[in-house]
Image (cartoon, grey):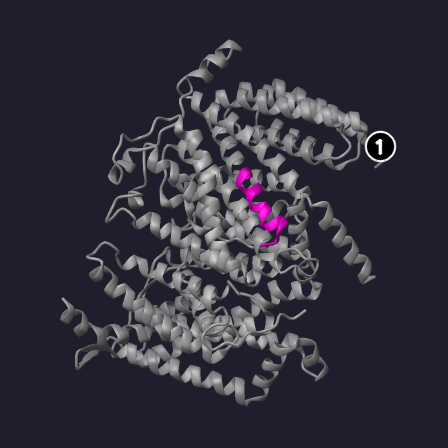
Amino acid sequence: MNRQTANIVVLGLALLSLALLWYVPGALAGALGLVGVVLAAYLRPSMSVRAGALALLALGFTLALSQVPRVNILFYGLVAVLVALITIPGVPRWIKALLGIAVLLVSVPIAGFNNTFFLELGIQIGIYAAMALGLNVVVGMAGLLDLGYAAFFAIGAYTWAIFGSPQAANFLSGSFPLPGNYFYLFMALAIITTAITGLLIGLPALRLRGDYLAIVTLGLGEVVRVLANNLDHPVNFTNGPQGITPVSRPDIGWFHSLMSSIGVELDARTDYQFFFYLLVLVIIGIVVLVNINLGNSRFGRAWIAIREDETAAKAMGIPMLGTKLLAFATGAAFSGAMGVIFAAQRTFVSPESFTLLASITILGMVVLGGMGSIPGVILGAAALTAINTDILKSFSEYLNNLRQAGVLSLPSQVEPAKYERLVFGVILVLMMIFRPQGLIPERRHQLEIEEAKEAQR
Amino acid sequence: MLEGLVALLPQVIFDGLLLGFVYAMIALGYTMVYGVLELINFAHSEIFMIGAVVGVEVFRYLGPAIPNGIVVLLLALLLGAIISGLMAMVVERLAYRPLRARGTTNRLVPLITAIGVSFVLQDVVRFIEGLWHNEFKLQMRVIPPLDGNFTFLTVFVQYKALILILVSLLMLFGLNYLVNRTKLGTAIRAVAQDMSTARLMGINPDVIISRTFLIGGALGGVAGVLFAVQYSTIDPYVGFFPGLKAFTAAVLGGIGNITGAMVGGLVLGQLETLSGTYLPTLTGGNFGTEYKDVIAFLILILLLLFRPQGLLGQVVKEKV
């Protein structure tokens, strides 16, 4: 399709969707809008048309969400616009930044104030994206397979949960819970404790071939879960399977006054959600910056060298153990920090959240998006979090309705919400067989694949 | 208190032996695949689980029809070995061979595939059982004479435990014979040592690898059936811990080493039952039996620190 037709199709569709989203907002208009986003990304319209179409569609989704806040597909439209912005080359950076900020700071909050589920979803996507970016350092850059990443998440979460609740009074004298503002201090503390844990675990495992790390981390993930489940006696550290609740949250009086000074009145239902949403956004920004800078640093280059060919890297004088340990501990630290946020945002921590499944979910995000690729990993996090928290559950509800209406007779054990393992397993296997470089490949991987194809010819 | 502990000892050692044989049989599957492909086949724990599920189903359907428990068990073992073996072959064909054919050098790719396959198998079995019987937890119903028992000195022995020991010994000796004395075994060892030279010698590595998966899978299936008979309650996720520990056993004995896997399995079985029984008493109930999983993991860590080649393994130079 030549550029002219692409321009007309994309712009026409965007305008049509905007009109529909405005006047007859609903799932149908949302679906059309999603098609619009996809076409804007895959056809090759001119740069300004592309940017304009995305802006129109973002506007459309926002307008529709302010009228019908219960239609999830509209929210995914916004997510799609964001993903398109991160991934599509050719749109000037300032337009991307402007549109991205508008979507994140205006559209999502508008949707979120009408339906807090969207803020929750945004926070979850953010937490998982930050963790996946941390795992990306380990798996994507350094090529070390970590199958127990949730263990560090758990250590971070429990670090704050124990001290931010009366729990710590069981083994320390003093007044607990600590005031909510210690939250920030504990983020720093969790980074340190998880990094040290990472060092301790990595030290025996990383001296050997990569495979051993996989099995050791797999074991670690389970051990941390066993400890969380059982360290309620002899001294009650973790409160066992019941978990710890309530966990203190930081004080947000200043946030209230800040928001009302710009004309946003927060109520008890949305204030913390919005606060954590913004906090997570800030953290993602930091994490992305750290990721980019690490990738370009001396260590980043050493990691990539190790990933590509360990023996050659060793021959070039890269200290193996130290460099690998650094990658492993860095990844662990990211996870630990997000654990603290997770604990405070939910005010509840239990071993349930830190199973092998959680570790594999995060690995799936990295693999789906593209190992080593920052936009890819964010896309992977958004997609899998949406599948996990919303899509499978909606599908289950749909089946249950059919069941109750008597249209369908399915045994109660067959319920899609319980089959996350299947979904993630299939994603991992299919990606590895057909597209190991991920949906949005890192540039270096892309080149490698092309080179391999050349060589085969 | 000490007397009580000592009196318990023969029973504990006997129970550890049973667990050890199960681990040993699973560990063989890991170690053989690792020998030829240098791949930790995470899906092997699910091959084991499939064997256990087949065992339960055979007893569910044939138990009422055939009055003799031994016959049913033999059928279950046979069917478990066949289905698990074929399943392992199918997994290799569908998931691992395409990766080899593409010539991926990235070591992560097969590992990630393996963990993905493991998850898929878990939920596929869960789905089938859900659709079939609407059950998640499966209960093994053994029939006479398997549920009989006697007391030998102070040790309480069930007939099914004796059968477990007998069958696993047979399997282990059979495998040793197969690997060391037959043509197929020679070919497997050749492929494990050097795939391209083996190819020059007229061995087709793909066929040999496929056979290796078949043998390892069949052993895993037998272990699964025996596990289900011995420990009664299973579910589609039951393979994880035995799998993890069997791998630890394989490392303990020296990975790639068949005798080592057996020894490792038996040692780990002892350590686990000993710690599981005595830890609660020795710590005054502060640390319960749940920590036996932690013990296995600590052993793995210590081993990697001090003797990564395992008890019977030799230090191998990395193939470049």
Quadrant where the N terminus of chain A sits is top right
In this picture, residue A120 sits left or right of residue B2 = right
Horizontal and vertical percent for residue A204? 49, 59
Q: Residue furthest bottom?
A: B181
Q: Quadrant of residue B97?
A: bottom right
Question: Observer-nearest residue: A212 or A404?
Answer: A212
Q: Residue drawn at (70%, 84%), measured in percent from left and top?
A: B201
Residue A10 appears in the picture as rendered = yes
Residue A136: say if magenta. yes
Which amino acid lies under the numbered mark 1 shown in the image of this protein? Arg
Question: Observer-nearest residue: B303 or A278?
Answer: B303
Question: Observer-nearest residue: A100 or A251?
Answer: A251
Residue at mark 1: chain: A
Q: Main secondary structure of the magenta part?
A: helix
Q: How many marks?
A: 1
Which residue carries the number 1 mark?
Answer: A3
Q: Residue drawn at (29%, 80%), measured in percent from left and top?
A: B162
Q: Quadrant of residue A429?
A: bottom right
Residue B226 appears in the picture as rendered = no
Question: Observer-nearest residue: A245 or A39?
Answer: A245
* B220 versus A59 height, above or below: below
In this picture, residue B89 sits left or right of residue B245 = right
Q: Residue drawn at (65%, 74%), measured in percent from left and top?
A: B206
Q: Quadrant of residue B275?
A: bottom left
Residue A227: say if magenta. no
Horizontal and vertical percent for residue B101? 69, 66
Horizontal and vertical percent for residue B157? 23, 78
Q: In this picture, which residue range is highlighted in magenta?
A: A129-144
Quadrant where the C terminus of chain A sits is bottom right
